[in-house]
Image: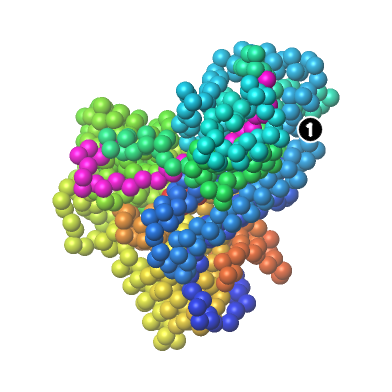
Amino acid sequence: MFYEKVLASYDPLPLREPLKPGEFAYINRELSWMEFNERVLEEARDKTNPLYERLNFMAITGSNLDEHFMIRAASLISLVQAGGSKPDPAGMTPKEQLSRLMDRCQDFVKKQYSTYNRQLIPALAEEGIEILKPSELDDAALDRLEKYFDEHIFPVLSPIAVDAARPFPLLANDSLNLIVLLQDRLELSRQELEKHHKASQHKEVDADDLYPPIALLQVPRNLSRLYLSGEREGVTQLVMLEDIIIHFMPKLFDNQTILEAYPFRILRDADFEIDEDDVADLLVEIEERVAMRKRGAVIRMTIDHRAPKVVRTILQEVLDVPDNQVFRVKGPLDLTFIRKVSSLAPRPELHYRPFSPQLSPDFSRDEDPFACIRQRDILLHHPYETFDDVIRGIRKASKDPQVLAIKQTLYRVSGKSPIIKALADAAQAGKQVLVLVELKARFDEENNIHWARELEKAGCHVLYGLKGLKTHSKITLIVREEADGIRRYVHLGTGNYNDSTAKIYTDLGIWSCSERVGEDASKFFNMISGYSLPRSWKQIIPAPRWLRDDTIFRIRREAEHAAKGRKAMIVAKVNSLLDEEIIEELYKASQAGVIIRLIVRGISSIRPGIKGLSENIEVRSLVGRFLEHSRIFYYYNDGEEDLLFGSADWMPRNLDRRIEIVSPIYDAECRRRVFEILSLELADTERARIEQSDGYYKRVDRRGKEILDSQIALCELATDAAAKIHPDPLSASHYEVRTSPAPSSAGED
């Protein structure tokens, strides 16, 4: 049935001619990532999306680009500076990659600000919401603004002079600053600055005597970027924090004349590697490395487009930023602020229709969750079904006197994690609690260090991860003593144990008390906590030792079936597809006649639709109100139909440098539901874009197709299923999904 559905919705790409000599079979990962962020920006430009959701998507493009610079671009810059010259699979040297990436980023930022200025700001104005300069306010509003400045902003500000006695200070990473030019004793005018800058290049001239005094001012992070001035004639008026500071800046510089003030923002290299062989205490080492991020090399500077060349030059020289890493923008720096508009001017009709994650039909609100799991495996599909059913199982285990032990891996958790509290409660109740907290989860290091220490204080046995590997698997093992003996309850998932992101990330989880899964779970935790190395597994397929070989075996088996004239199909849903060996095997399978349909949210280095190479391969990306995060793998297997899910993408890091788990799905109802999910996503006409052979993406051709938004369809399915079992549906106060996703720019998850 699923095979036929996939074929029915399959619309092969128009084929292009075979690769010519010198052409490569791979798409560069950095440019493919930029295509992903372009798809997010398309959602900000799409007028069929509610306005506040468009603002959210715009903010996401900004945070995505920031992270990409701090990690991927920073790594490329370091590689170029170190003289690296090895081409990537797409045939580009590091220098070529960096050049192409910077050009693409410059174009992308221009498109961002064109969207902001020409589409979003006018659309807000049509809804009676304006972002104004202080000078555009009436007298009464300006008086209120001045009072706010005097009482709330002025005490926080710290102007820093820059001169011979006070050198240029260390500016924090991801900081928004103002550079202020003051009138000096020579009374230099702005027009004279360029002339004096040129003169300062001569060694015999003391540059300190040629510039006017400079001051720096960091825009406070702990104050809102947007100030609600009030309403006037039905229009909500907002003012940017930096504009307020600039307007009242004379109060900060008594007896000084301010020539100019310009906002600028810097990003620093936030990537780091640790040689764990030389580390005595991993926790302490990571704390030190996180602190060093504040002093990393500046890899991007964004500055107000009005800033004259001499000001940019001063900053570039001091911060050591080349021209192609300087971005001049016409509008507010750091567009992530724009998502705050909705909280200052609440307008429910400008959001997506609210959706409350539903209770699973397989869990009763009152019944013991362990009793439900004993009946059969239970699939949870978040955020369509509530993550509370995961939390409830762990909470129940923490208090249940029959539970002897709880073991869990944690990669990212929320700031006030109920799972952390449940684990701590379990340890304090005398249960054996083993928790692997991955300290190397990028940008969550500090949060995870905090939770690791809290868990240790509570009496949990805490592991900090394995040397040389990140533990990215999502698994919980609960050991319970029952009337008929010890029973193991296992939760396996595709997403983090994070109750916050579970509201906006699509993920699968399965609760099971299968003996096969339980035995494997015990072996898995013994492996990561001790020196055990299992020779085989009954069900789960871990990385790095086993998953790559298993994946290649399954792809080759499909190719063998196709070569014999049998039906053959592969469907895979991942966040990123980068691994060269996997891509090569997919190319060979395509050439053998295997139908291959891939759902890849982010980076895809494969080139579909090329004669003799990939003519049977389709790659689609879904970008919508929820972030597509689940990993699912299907192989027709001559009618046996293997279906698996897990935590691993098809990337070298997931297959070779991370602890991951992929597991088959055997339960008939779980399989039916996962097939339903894949069928809807493969038939999506609204959220899907199709990758072309050149790496660019186009929206699905809707002609002759039924209009289908897979995410809306899945919301409706979850609501209908819950209503049949639970007559009193969840109250909207349980929680409402009103925000767009925050796609991970570097594909960290």
Q: Is residue 281 magenta?
A: yes
Applied colour scheme: rainbow
Q: Residue at (66%, 50%) from the top-left corner?
A: 110
Segment colored magenta:
257-283
Secondary structure at badge 1 equals: loop
Identified at 55% across, 60% down, the residue is 100
Q: Position of residue 524 (x, y in %)?
A: 24, 52
Q: Residue 157's x, y, as percent?
A: 56, 20
Residue 132 in view (yes/no): yes
Mark yes or no: residue 353 visible: no
Classify residue 66 as left or right of residue 578: right
Q: Which residue carries the number 1 mark?
A: 128
Q: Is residue 599 magenta?
A: no
Above or below, comparing residue 546 to residue 178 in the picture:
below
Where residue 510 appears, as percent x and y from the top left, is 39, 51
Q: Position of residue 98 (x, y in %)?
A: 50, 57
